[in-house]
Image (spheres, rainbow, N blue to C red):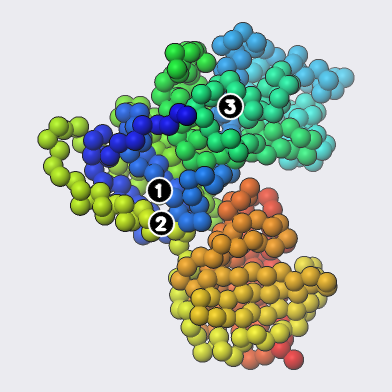
């Protein structure tokens, strides 16, 4: 069983207090973190998870999937099954229309890996067909390939479909049995699929943060591991190099430093596998340092930059030389261990009692006609939190929440794991937030304003594609 060797932070030139400072800085900035892992000189020096997340829990890694597709293509190129200048239309003749647009006809695997396709947007979101792969071949190109960088998620999705077509097995099964064989990635890890059963190469990876760290370990070995060359070092180096300027598309400084082949460059001369919401595998080879984070920064302006800055300024900028005469660090290590044991997704801040609470406890409100079909609403309280009830014809949605701590719940409709908390943020205003911790990552928010016999409920969601029932929407109800 392969495990990354474990060492104390101090033995690898990192102070435990530096790691604690990074964690506390992210807490002060209210960034909803899910995990932080650090590796230096090939040794794991820190591993922390925020309840309800834990070491074995799979996490949606979103666009980190794209980097995995690049490694798969690199493996097939290294082993002579593909070439970078292969034309994609030659590899999917069954998906091509009778008249192939000239821009599409000249597009190569290299163009696709570099995000320099002939499209400026993700083609399967155009609504042309239910076949996500086919959409890539029937959409109308708008510029020649190999020129302008556009972040097009349909490109790695098609490359992922190509890997499945050539291998005859699901993409992540292929990766675990070839590229990552022997790394002992989580046996439960997998990729979500599109409506036609093709693995979502652009955003579908479900794995553990430790799986990402092992992949970082693999990349630090430049494609050769356990004495076996899986991917050529030339391919790895090129994939991690600066190929395309990304400044026109980047919302943050750390996303404006250039792009390789499904890998981003960093501000500090390294690389990052980047996934929406703070899923990051940051590699700083000059310091032989790797950081993995999972989080949910959706809805937090500049949230990812807070993570980058905390890592750069608290860890990378303060690295010490390894010293044989390192002073006793037991107190700092004990402090870090205690902080790590306490990590949890932060609950909603506010009051956990309000005079209004006793007035509305258990009252049933008749809800005006609405698109959700909610007929009645009530909220009940106990000393630990409460539960929000929505009653629909023949069904009841129950949304429990904790006061001062998150309750792990099953969110209704989608039956997904969530961490739910609430607080009174005003004398007449109850706020409930549910962090979705499942194949989707995001949050659903409820703000209840009570006045006399009336309640106004404002709902919204911060999540990519689901939970649209809740965003944004108002419900108005009366206690009769």
Image side of residue 129 versus residue 420, left or right: right
Q: Which residue is mark 3?
A: 176
- Compare marks 2 and 3 and give the one earlier in the sequence: 3
Q: CA distance from mark 1 to mark 3?
A: 25 Å
Q: Position of residue 57 (x, y in %)?
A: 54, 47
The percent position of residue 242, horizontal first and vertical second, equals 46, 24
Residue lying at 61% horizontally and 56% vertically, measured from the top left: 417
Spot the residue most to the front: 1
Residue 52 horizontal/vertical position (percent): 51, 56
Task: Compare marks 1 and 2 and give the one earlier in the sequence.
Answer: 1
Work out how far the residue at label 2 is from the one at label 3, CA to CA, in angstroms.
31 Å
Q: Nearer the viewer, residue 356 or 263?
A: 356
Q: Residue at x 23, y 39 (%)?
A: 10
Q: Please give the name of the residue rendered at 64% of the width and 69% of the height, measured from the top-left corner.
A: 399
Q: Which residue is mark 1?
A: 48
Q: Residue at x 35, y 28 (%)?
A: 42
Q: Are marks 1 and 2 in contact (CB under 8 Å)?
A: yes
Query: From the viewer's perspective, is residue 370 above or below residue 337?
Result: below
Q: Which mark is residue 336?
A: none
Q: Nearer the viewer, residue 148 or 442?
A: 442
Which part of the image, by quadrant, shows the C terminus?
bottom right
- Count of marks overlaid on the render: 3
Q: Please give the residue where the numbered disc 2 appears in the rendered image.
A: 343
Q: Earlier in the sequence, mark 1 or mark 3?
A: 1
Residue nearest the observer in this picture, 408 or 82: 408
Name the quadrant containing residue 47.
top left
Could you say where residue 189 lies in the image, as x and y percent from the top left?
59, 37
Q: Are marks 2 and 3 in contact (CB under 8 Å)?
A: no
Q: CA distance from mark 1 to mark 2?
A: 8 Å
């Amino acid at each position: 069983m392969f495990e990354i060797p474990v060492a104390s932070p101090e033995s690898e030139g990192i102070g435990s207090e530096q790691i604690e400072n990074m964690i506390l800085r992210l807490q002060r900035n209210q960034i909803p973190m899910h995990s932080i892992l650090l590796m230096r000189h090939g040794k794991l020096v820190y591993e922390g998870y925020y309840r309800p997340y834990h070491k074995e829990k799979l996490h949606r890694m979103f666009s980190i999937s794209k980097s995995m597709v690049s490694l798969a293509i690199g493996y097939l190129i290294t082993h002579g099954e593909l070439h970078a200048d292969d034309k994609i239309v030659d590899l999917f003749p069954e998906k091509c229309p009778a008249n192939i647009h000239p821009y599409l006809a000249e597009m190569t695997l290299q163009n696709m890996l570099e995000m320099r396709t002939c499209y400026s947007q993700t083609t399967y979101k155009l609504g042309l067909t239910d076949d996500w792969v086919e959409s890539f071949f029937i959409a109308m190109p708008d510029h020649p390939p190999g020129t302008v960088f556009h972040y097009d998620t349909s490109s790695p999705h098609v490359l992922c479909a190509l890997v499945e077509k050539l291998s005859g097995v699901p993409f992540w099964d292929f990766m675990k049995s070839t590229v990552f064989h022997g790394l002992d990635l989580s046996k439960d890890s997998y990729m979500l699929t599109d409506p036609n059963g093709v693995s979502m190469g652009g955003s579908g990876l479900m794995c553990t943060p430790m799986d990402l760290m092992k992949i970082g370990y693999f990349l630090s070995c430049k494609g050769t591991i356990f004495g076996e060359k899986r991917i050529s070092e030339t391919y790895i180096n090129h994939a991690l190099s600066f190929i395309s300027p990304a400044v026109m598309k980047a919302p943050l400084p750390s996303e404006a430093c250039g792009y390789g082949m499904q890998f981003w460059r960093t501000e500090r001369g390294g690389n990052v596998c980047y996934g929406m919401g703070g899923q990051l595998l940051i590699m700083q080879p000059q310091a032989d340092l790797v950081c993995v984070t999972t989080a949910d920064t959706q809805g937090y302006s500049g949230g990812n930059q807070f993570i980058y800055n905390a890592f750069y300024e608290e860890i990378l900028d303060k690295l010490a030389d390894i010293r044989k005469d390192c002073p006793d660090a037991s107190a700092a290590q004990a402090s870090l261990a205690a902080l790590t044991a306490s990590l949890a997704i932060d609950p909603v801040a506010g009051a956990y009692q309000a005079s209004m609470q006793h007035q509305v406890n258990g009252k049933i409100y008749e809800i005006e006609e609405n698109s959700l079909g909610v007929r009645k609403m009530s909220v009940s309280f106990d000393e630990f939190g409460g539960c929000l009830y929505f009653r629909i014809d023949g069904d009841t949605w129950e949304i429990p929440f904790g006061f001062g701590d998150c309750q792990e719940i099953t969110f209704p409709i989608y039956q997904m794991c969530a961490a739910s908390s609430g607080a009174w943020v005003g004398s007449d205003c109850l706020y409930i937030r549910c962090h979705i911790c499942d194949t989707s990552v995001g949050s659903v928010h409820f703000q209840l304003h009570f006045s006399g016999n009336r309640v106004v409920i404002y709902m919204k969601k911060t999540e990519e594609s689901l939970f649209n029932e809740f965003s944004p929407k108002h419900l108005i109800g009366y206690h009769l």
